[in-house]
Image: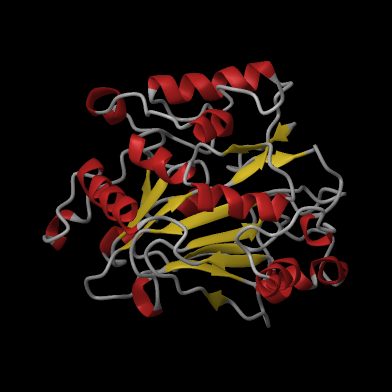
């Protein structure tokens, strides 16, 4: 069963009580190496190189520029006001792109190598893919002069801890000053002990990072970063002169096939090209996808990842 709060934009699961770092593998690894698996369970994140085909990456990047009504060759067009504010205030002016069900997004979601990576993470095949958005983050100037942030998308005061996974597919080079994903791996490794040292009124959605190393993760186009939802993370500021961070958010979690109402909500979102009915997603007031796109065609794998067809029976 998936659960979420207003601040939690990402599904967690109650289908297992075993924390992801404590899974004892029953199935052979498909994509991750043993070294990848060790890094994942110790530090809470792993990078799958070349997870999506280059053609998929380029056409989605081009689509995001079109969707945002920006010209990649004209920086003067990069600073339009966001169409709606976010309830998660730290996301304002961080380049979120409220596109959810276009064919190009689904092409990456149903890419077998991406699915197989999440099978490795969960040690099971019956997964649903989260219906999520994208990001196009130009250099931070004017109203976009954010300093970045570190937070959790789950409430770390809940015991036992919520269990969930998140992911980011790079659509452009992410390194150095361009901004992108940042995280605190050492905090993930020591989270339970660290919490014992914190005051009782600590913010369970955002850590005090004093004395902790914040790691900037470099990625090439087509690389997929998967991270545990207990990993403190965020978007670092884009300090470059003229480079843009572009990414698609992709994650998967155990299918909740007994939850018929949720399954139908997911199917409707796909069929009608609508944003998820969750407070963390403001959606696109122009309804661009309804006007300019058709319902995405799904492969047999995609049908199961959506919930259109069931893994069981």
Classify the position of the C terminus by image quarter: top right
Residue 183 in the image: x percent, y percent? 59, 69
Across and down, in percent, residue 274 comes to 41, 25
Residue at the image point whose x is 65% and y is 56% from the top: 152
Q: Residue at x 86, y 71 (%)?
A: 193
The one nearer the camera, 108 or 196, is 108
Q: Position of residue 66 (x, y in %)?
A: 20, 44
In this rendered view, identify the residue nearer to me: 47 or 215.
47
What count of labels does the image hold?
Answer: 0
Residue at image point 34% right, 65% down: 145
Residue beneath the point at 29% across and 67% down? 139
**Residue 61: in sight, yes or no?**
yes
Q: Where is 204 relative to 191, above or below?
A: above
Q: Is residue 39 above or below residue 305?
A: below
Image position of 36 with respect to 125: above or below:
below
Quadrant in which the N terminus appears: top right
Percent coordinates x, y for residue 285 in the rendering? 32, 29
Q: How is the image coloured?
A: secondary structure
Q: Quadrant of residue 63?
A: top left
Place residue 287 in its image quadrant.
Answer: top left
Is residue 286 in view from this perspective? no
Locate residue 266 relative to residue 206 in the image: left or right: left
């Amino acid at each position: 069963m998936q659960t979420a709060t207003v601040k939690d934009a990402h599904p967690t699961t109650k289908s297992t009580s075993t924390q992801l770092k404590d899974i004892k593998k029953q199935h052979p690894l498909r994509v991750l190496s043993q070294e990848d698996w060790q890094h994942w369970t110790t530090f809470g994140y792993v990078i799958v190189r070349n997870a999506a085909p280059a053609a998929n990456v380029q056409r989605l990047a081009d689509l995001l520029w079109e969707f945002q009504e920006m010209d990649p060759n004209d920086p003067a067009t990069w600073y339009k006001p966001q169409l709606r504010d976010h309830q998660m205030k730290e996301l304002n002016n961080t380049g979120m792109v409220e596109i959810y069900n276009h064919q190009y997004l689904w092409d990456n979601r149903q890419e077998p190598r991406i699915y197989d990576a999440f099978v490795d993470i969960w040690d099971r095949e019956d997964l649903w893919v989260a219906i999520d958005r994208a990001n196009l983050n130009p250099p931070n100037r004017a109203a976009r002069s954010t300093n970045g942030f570190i937070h959790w998308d789950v409430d770390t005061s809940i015991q036992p801890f919520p269990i969930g996974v998140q992911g980011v597919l790079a659509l452009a080079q992410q390194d150095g000053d361009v901004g992108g994903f940042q995280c605190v791996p050492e905090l993930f490794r020591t989270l339970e002990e660290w919490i014992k040292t914190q005051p009782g009124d600590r913010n369970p959605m955002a850590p005090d990072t004093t004395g902790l190393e914040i790691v900037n993760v470099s990625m090439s186009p087509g690389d997929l970063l998967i991270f545990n939802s207990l990993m403190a993370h965020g978007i670092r500021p884009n300090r470059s002169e003229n480079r843009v961070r572009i990414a698609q958010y992709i994650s998967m979690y155990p299918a909740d096939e007994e939850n018929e109402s949720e399954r139908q909500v997911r199917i409707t979102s796909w069929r009608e090209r609508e944003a998820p009915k969750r407070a963390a997603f403001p959606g696109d007031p122009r309804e661009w996808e309804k006007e300019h796109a058709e319902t995405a065609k799904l492969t047999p794998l995609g049908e199961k990842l959506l919930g259109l067809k069931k893994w069981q029976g």
